[in-house]
Image: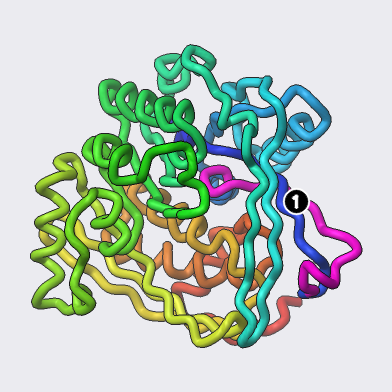
Amino acid sequence: MKNIVAFGEMLMRLSPPDNLRFFQASSFDASYSGAEFNTMASLQRWGLPTQFVTKLPANDFGDKAISEMSRYQVGSKYVARGGNRLGIYFLEKGSAIRHSKVIYDRAESAVAQIQEGEIDWKQVFANASWFHWSGITPGISETAARECLKACKVASEMGLKISCDLNYRSTLWKWGKNPEEILPEILSITNVILGDLATLYKMLGKREIEPDYLKPETLGKYYEEVLEVCKELEYLPTTLRYSLNASHQKIGGIMYAKGELVNSETKEILPVVDRLGTGDAFMAGIIYGLYNNLSLQKTLDFAVATSAYKHTMSGDINIASLDEVHAIMDGELSALIKR
């Protein structure tokens, strides 16, 4: 099997224990993650070969991030070393009617300082068939955006399938450009785009979408407008999240592909243990299904099941096994003790 490659940033996550607020915290639980890495960790757990491309500082924290990649058996062969620091984000977990809060501390991180020539993309993609990126990376810095575009161009030239999770983070785009100035060129050569249509329209610099865009009679029109810009787009999956409160979520999904629209059954999660990383789990499910040539329906059902199950696990990374995901797909929701 050929590699699935992702490019992005590895971060240290610091979170107060026991659902404490930042103001109450005297200590923080530390873990390491990142949107693109989280996706690769799931795929590797499900038996697919992965490589994660990033830049890490040549210090103890960079070494720890490498060890975390090894822990999840994700390839680190093409990690560049250097730069000032590892990016950090602080998470205050929400509960019931109190929402979660994220504070970023990633300015001047190693990936933000990545330079042209540090990654040999032709070498990276020599034994690969898939490349994954997210809308987070181009928002980090001008050089990260340039490197993401270069990676996608090389991947396209070499015939790889390219996927993207839009992952719009308004607080990251501080380096002088807006997403609609940068992303249309990258999205135009991307084959799989995960995101809601309203966000995609914004990133493409198109008009504001109508509130009723999810109606079957109008949905096709919006998809066709996207295809006018994104000429290489083949699959457009969307997570459908119904948030009753921070502890009670419902997860479903739809996917548009070549004129066909498929829907998945909604899964209810109560109580939610950790919402972070659930979109990355969904993305991993989509890639897994398409990589293995599953039907559109099975691919979407798999993605919804693994995203729903991720809500039950602490940390950003989905560690569900294939058997566990298939059990959720099959409706085994009683969670009886396995003896």
Q: Is residue 126 above or below residue 107?
A: above
Q: Check if residue 229 falls in the magenta segment.
A: no
Q: Would you name the residue on which mark 1 appears?
A: 31
Write the residue at 72% across / 81% down: 337
Confirm whether residue 271 shows in the render: no
Instruction: Point out the image quarter for the N terminus.
Output: top left
Q: How many marks?
A: 1
Q: Amino acid at mark 1?
A: Ser
- The foreground one among 118 and 162 is 118
Please, which colouring scheme is shown? rainbow
Instruction: Point out the image quarter for the C terminus.
Output: bottom right
Relative to 117, 74 lies left or right? right
Write the residue at 65% across / 69% down: 274
Write the residue at 41% across / 22% down: 125
Residue 302 in the image, given as x and y percentages of width and height: 42, 64
Residue 90 in the image, given as x and y percentages of width and height: 70, 57
- The foreground one among 99 and 230 is 99
Q: Residues within 10 Å of mark 1 (few under 14, many from 20)?
A: some
Q: Is residue 74 above or below residue 128?
A: below
Relative to 73, 192 lies left or right? left
Q: Is residue 90 above or below residue 209?
A: above
- SS under mark 1: strand
- The foreground one among 264 and 114 is 114
Residue projecting furthest to the front: 176
- The foreground one among 9 and 1 is 9
Q: Quadrant of residue 217?
A: bottom left
Confirm whether residue 283 shows in the render: yes
Q: Is residue 16 above or below residue 164?
A: below
Write the residue at 44% across / 54% down: 167
Residue span colored magenta:
20-37
Residue 49 in the image, given as x and y percentages of width and height: 52, 36
Residue 145 in the image, given as x and y percentages of width and height: 42, 32
